[in-house]
Amino acid sequence: MNVYDFDGTVYAGDSSADFYRWLLRRYPAMLRSLPRQSLAAIQYYILRKGSKTEMKTVFFSAFRYASISEVLLSEFWDSHGKKLCSWYLQQKREDDVIISASPEFLLRPAMDMLGLSALLGSRVDVHSGAFDGLNCHGEEKVRRFRETYGEAAVAAFYSDRLSDAPMARLAERAYLVKNKNPQSATLTPWP
């Protein structure tokens, strides 16, 4: 099987950030969360305090001011599906696994668009932004993969982030994806 990171790899950009900005235009009340989000970002990125899961929980807490539904998620992907990368679309297989730090509820409609079913993402409550478990990032991706697929072999792994090195080490081949445009990407062997 081949395993792919999603944001910056299969999708040109950060789907969570795009979704947040898209939601904000519809639900400006989400701005009420901005002071807490700013503080959480400063604590995590500048002061190096707390975990990524804690920081992202505060970020996603703005969802409580929005009415997120399957219809709303479909509307988002109807407008953002064009950011799914052509290099991936040309090689995708039905048994591909997508593993991402983005919320599973957000990526599920994209998976449907791609005709894929195997998704491992962060388990985030769509209404509160609370995490059920850890942010699916770094070593957590490996833990979640092994929890779901046991010792299954990974033929190839693709990601735009060096922080995905733990997953890359599982694969027979791994590629670093440089991808700012959905129409083109550069794939290089993992460093």
Image: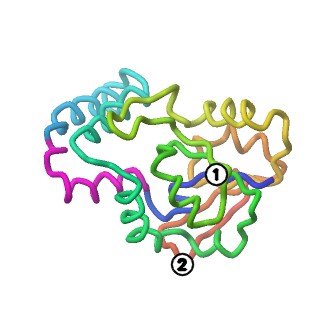
Residue 120's x, y, as percent? Answer: 61, 43
Q: Where residue 32 appears, x then y in whole percent? A: 14, 38
| Tag shown at residue 137 | none
Relative to 131, does residue 75 appear above or below in the rendering?
A: below
Q: Disc 1 residue type?
A: Ile
Let me know if residue 72 is in the magenta part.
no
Label pair 2/1, CB-CB below 8 angstroms: no
Q: Is residue 97 left or right of residue 12?
A: right
Tell me if residue 19 is in the magenta stretch: yes
Tell me the distance, in whole angstroms, between the alpha carbons under discs 2 and 1.
20 Å
User: In the rendered view, would you say 72 is above or below 78?
Assistant: above
Residue at 81% in and 53% down? 1
Residue located 56% across and 54% down the image = 6
Q: Which mark is nearer the camera, 2 or 1?
A: 1
| Residue drawn at the location 58% of the way across and 41% of the way down | 163
Q: Amino acid at mark 2?
A: Gln
How crowded is the residue under tag 2: few (<14 C-alpha within 10 Å), some, or many (20+)? some
Residue 109 shown left or right of residue 76 in the figure: right
Report the side of 180 relative to 153 (left or right). left
Locate residue 183, reporting x and y percent: 54, 78
Query: Which of pointers 2 and 1 lies earlier in the amino acid sequence?
Result: 1
Q: Which mark is residue 183?
A: 2
Q: Quadrant of residue 144?
A: top right
Where in the figure is residue 159, as x and y percent of width and height? 62, 53
Q: Residues within 10 Å of mark 1 (few under 14, many from 20)?
A: many
Left or right? Give the position of 83 relative to 126: right
Q: Tell me where the magenta segment starts and ends, as one range.
A: 15-31
User: As rendered, which of 79 and 134 lies closer to the eye?
Assistant: 79
Q: Which residue matches tag 1?
A: 98
